[in-house]
Image: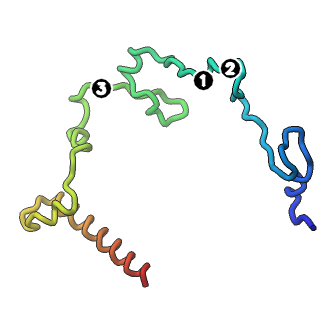
């Protein structure tokens, strides 16, 4: 039997921890404790090192710059109006189809066209996949 790659030779060498011949073994991960070891206390959740004051005045983890700092939370009046509408529920395609297209506001009409085109594309793709 000829071995085709050099990595196959490792399975031939029997290590101390190997259970059966030819079984690949892995080293224990650094920093992880084995069952029954004295490091069981390290598995407990660690308390946050940030104070409550820092958490309530900054957006922790929002910094994208290497030398930057986390941005401060500003009063609501400092943010533009569109920010408060980002999480508003928008109508689904089925709801838009029930309404009269001629009376829809411009934003809903754009959404209807986008969702309708997406549904048509999915339908065409599923028909092509069946053929």
> In the picture provided, is 18 more to the left or to the right than 104?
right
Q: Residue at x 41, y 18 (%)?
A: 54
Label disc, if present, on residue 29 of the rendered structure: none
Nearest the camera: 35 or 33?
A: 35
Please state the horizontal and vertical placement of residue 108, each as a whole percent of the image.
17, 59
> In the picture provided, is 62 more to the left or to the right than 95?
right
Quadrant location of the N terminus in the rendered image: bottom right
> In the picture provided, is 99 more to the left or to the right than 13?
left
Question: Circle 3 sits in a helix, a strand or a loop, which is it?
Answer: loop
Given contact means CB atoms under 8 Å apart, are the residues at marks 1 and 3 in contact?
A: no
Given contact means CB atoms under 8 Å apart, are the residues at marks 2 and 1 in contact?
A: yes
Residue at label 1?
43
Nearest the camera: 120 or 127?
A: 127
Residue at label 3?
74
Nearest the camera: 92 or 67?
A: 92
Packing grade of label 1 (10 A; few <14, some 14-19, many >=20) is few
Report the residue that reaches farthest toward the bottom.
Answer: 131
Which comes sooner in the sequence, label 3 or label 2?
A: 2
Label disc, if present, on residue 39 of the rendered structure: 2
Q: Residue at x 43, y 85 (%)?
A: 131
Report the number of discs.
Answer: 3
């Amino acid at each position: 039997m000829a071995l085709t790659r050099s990595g196959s030779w490792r399975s031939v060498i029997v290590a101390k921890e190997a259970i059966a011949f030819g079984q690949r073994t892995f080293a224990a991960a650094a920093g992880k404790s084995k069952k029954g070891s004295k490091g069981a206390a390290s598995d407990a959740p660690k308390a946050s090192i940030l104070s409550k004051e820092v958490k309530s005045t900054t957006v922790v983890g929002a910094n994208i710059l290497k030398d930057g700092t986390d941005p401060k939370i500003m009063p609501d009046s400092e943010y533009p109006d569109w920010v408060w509408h980002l999480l508003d529920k928008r109508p689904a395609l089925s709801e838009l189809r029930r309404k009269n297209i001629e009376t829809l506001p411009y934003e809903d009409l754009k959404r209807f066209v986008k969702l309708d085109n997406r549904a048509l594309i999915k339908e065409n793709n599923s028909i092509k996949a069946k053929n």
